[in-house]
Image (spheres, helix red, strand yellow):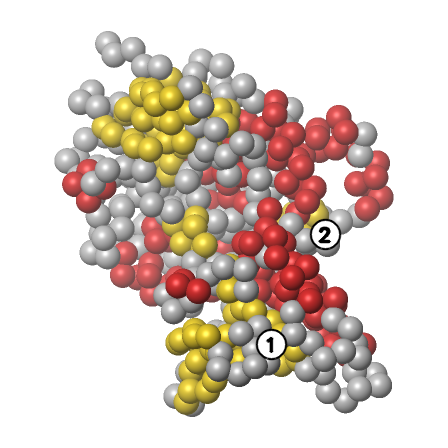
Amino acid sequence: MTTYDHDVIAVGLGPFNLGLAALLEGVPELNAAVFEQREGFAWHPGLMLPDSEVQVPFLADLVTLADPTSPHSFLNYLHERGRLYRFYFHERLHLLRSEFDAYCRWVAERLPSIRFRHRVTAVEPLRDGGWSVTVQSPNGLATKTARHVVLGVGGVPFVPACGVPHLGTSVLHSGDYLTHRDQLRAARSVTVIGSGQSAAEVFCDLLEAMDPGGTQRLDWFTRSRGFLPMEYSKLGLEHFTPEYTSWFHGLSPERRDELRAGQDLLYKGISMETSARIYDALYARTVERDELPVQYRSTCEVVEVAPSDRGDACWCLRLRHRDEDTEFDHHTDAVVFATGYRDAPLPVPHPESLFALDAQGRPEIDLDYRVRLRDGRPSTLFVQNAELHTHGVGTPDLGLAAHRNAVIINGILGRERYAVRDRNVFQRFGSPDGTRAAGERAA
């Protein structure tokens, strides 16, 4: 029998693999290691604005929805920090983003399985079904072996191709906003591109900092159909459940893609609170001034970025109105692309020869988050937040993270260590006489 260095190696340390590491602490028979290239835990530090909140309730911490008794829960963090009564009287379900980050760092510091400053450069299969993991650390290059690997490498900032050559101090992704915040607030004009929560928070932060009687210009464009709120009704939230994930996974790839194309506002819209803050700031600043040097327009996509030939601006954006099919130029000193993230490349050489792929070239991922292997062998490779195309809108949601980790751990053990229930919400998905009833697990 092969002897491995670890039973489980997790690659990358965002909230999802941090939650996995926390739940694995409750499974002493598994020897786990988590490799992270950064020097410490940090969760979107470039957007850690003072008043920003996490968009899920505090029960969607790293562990509670899988194990409410875990010592790594947010409530235990408050208890050990002496903040439990303060949080009680705060009377908010949603955490400040800065406090969620502090909580995650507190958990990371308690877990001996986490290795910072360890960059995984390759994950390769072994003949017996395990994995070889190449790691670059301060001590040099090393190879570790594991029976199971969990990839949680996260996303990388996405900027439209026309903006990429100009990235720097005045053209940037919103993930770098705080680094350049003072410079942007002092600029003659700033343009925000995007329609989601990050774009709204950046726009709101710049708007609230504007001198009401000043001349600074602030603009906001999005290719989306409007500056629309995220779906946050109680019935709508039932899409972020194990039942919906199971039902969605059982559909054909073509049907899944068709469904997701119409579900952006389930997870990409603007919070009602941020939308209200923006409107209220505009209203207050126009009490004695009819118009502000502020505009926002939807259905406008950036098609070109070039240096401006005008003396009052650094950049010229060429935008196309998607409904009118017209183009216009917009001049500005700075551009913030709040255009989201794309999946980071998996550290697996030649994945096309290893993974089973769908017609779009995406890895086929089983309901229990295993990546299917091309040769049909049983897989011991799992993914975190790389399965939007197979598992649906709940994939990036913190509220399903503990469930996913419970499923992964149970799959590694071959038994149920953490309870995974088929019925969690009132809604049922699919038809009563469908080929697979809602809540029924796919094979």
Label disc, if present, on residue 5 of the rendered structure = none
**Left or right: 363 as drawn, with respect to 184:** left
Question: In the figure, residue 226 lies in which quadrant?
Answer: bottom right
| On screen, residue 3 above or below 151 | above
Mark 1 sits on what residue? Answer: 219
Q: Quadrant of residue 151?
A: top left
Residue 203 x/y as whole percent: 64, 68
In depth, the one of 282 and 163 nearer the eye is 163
Give the quarter of the figure containing the C terminus. Answer: top left
Disc on the earlier residue, 2 or 1: 2
Which residue lies at the image location 32% right of the left edge and 38% below the top edge?
347
Question: Judging from the image, what secondary structure is the residue with disc 2 in?
Answer: loop
User: Is residue 212 shown to the viewer in this render?
Assistant: yes
**Residue drawn where x is 68% and y is 65% of the image:** 185
Residue linked to disc 2: 50
Residue 292 percent location from the top left of the image: 72, 83
Q: Amino acid at mark 1?
A: Asp
| Residue 401, placed above or below residue 308 | above
Quadrant assignment for the N terminus: top left
Towards the viewer: 341 or 219 = 219
Q: Looking at the image, which residue is at 51% across and 64% down?
A: 171
Residue drawn at 27 percent across, 46 percent down: 363
